[in-house]
Image (cartoon, rainbow, N blue to C red):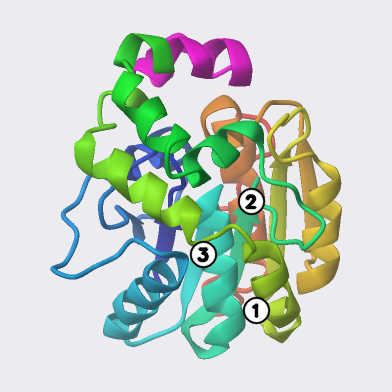
Amino acid sequence: MPVILIHGVPDTHRLWSGVRRYLTRTDVEAWDLPGFGAPRPEGFGSTKEEYADWLISRLEEIGEPVDLVGHDWGCILTARVASLRPDLVRTWAGGNGPISARYMWHPLAKIWQDPVEGERFMEGLTPEGFAADLVTGFEVPADLAEETVRYVDTLMKDSILKLYRSAVRMGGEWEPELGRMSAPGLVFWGARDPACPVGFADELGRAVMAERVLKLDCNHWSVLQRPAQVAAALEQHWRRRRPENPSMPAPSEER
């Protein structure tokens, strides 16, 4: 029963490096979404439906239910997969990714969704400027912000634009199926997230009947800002479902 970690935008698998350092489990994989530090398959259009289908196909290859975790768009996509294919998911956890008809996309997302302004934004984007925005707007530590923007290449920029333009009405389209999720759920959320207000954590928790909604004293990138707390919450979540493995170490809430 491996753990599969899915990043969001504009990230790669490296998002999870801090959390993985605190996990006691060794059966953990962090995947790159197509176009985000990994090639896009031929003909792949980077729509939200294609990303969900891609994730389903990858999980089918594993051959057993997994402990699925996502942040930001990773939260949205993994919740979608857990709703459509509950047979593939043993437990689910996600954070800072609203799936609600009541959610209004944040200002930057609206720029990316505009066919003129989005291209203009990406053409003018510089690593230095983007890193500074992550630090000042989202309180990402400077070294981690610099690491993040290093991988924002032409392919990722194009993938971001295509993904967001496919998702203008994502909340209303995907919210109704959330109730089909049967996997035990954990919602974790940076409580000071300006792009995805913390009220949507409670809403998502109710929609998927999550066992716990954890609100962390941080901004949007909870995985970068509170890796020890996220890891501890995840292992507590998984441990409740692993009676067949009594030797699994108990996670500490303080590390």
Residue 254 spot, x, y in % from top left: 67, 31
Q: Residue at x 56, y 85 (%)?
A: 84
Q: Is residue 33 above or below residue 147?
A: below
Callout 1, which amino acid? Ala
Distance from Cα at disc 3 to Cα at disc 1: 15 Å
Q: Residue at x 53, y 13 (%)?
A: 135
Distance from Cα at disc 3 to Cα at disc 2: 9 Å
Near mark 1 (Cα within 10 A), the count class, few <14, some 14-19 or many ≥20, is: many
Q: Nearer the viewer, residue 202 or 188?
A: 202
Q: Residue at x 39, y 46 (%)?
A: 160
Which residue does the numbered mark 3 point to in the structure image? 77
Marker disc for residue 55: none
Q: Give whichever of discs 1 and 2 has the lower sequence position.
A: 2
Work out whether residue 248 can be spotted.
no
Q: Give whichever of discs 3 and 2 has the lower sequence position.
A: 3
Q: Nearer the viewer, mark 3 or mark 1?
A: 3
Which residue does the numbered mark 1 point to in the structure image? 183
Mark 1 touches mark 2? (CB < 8 Å): no
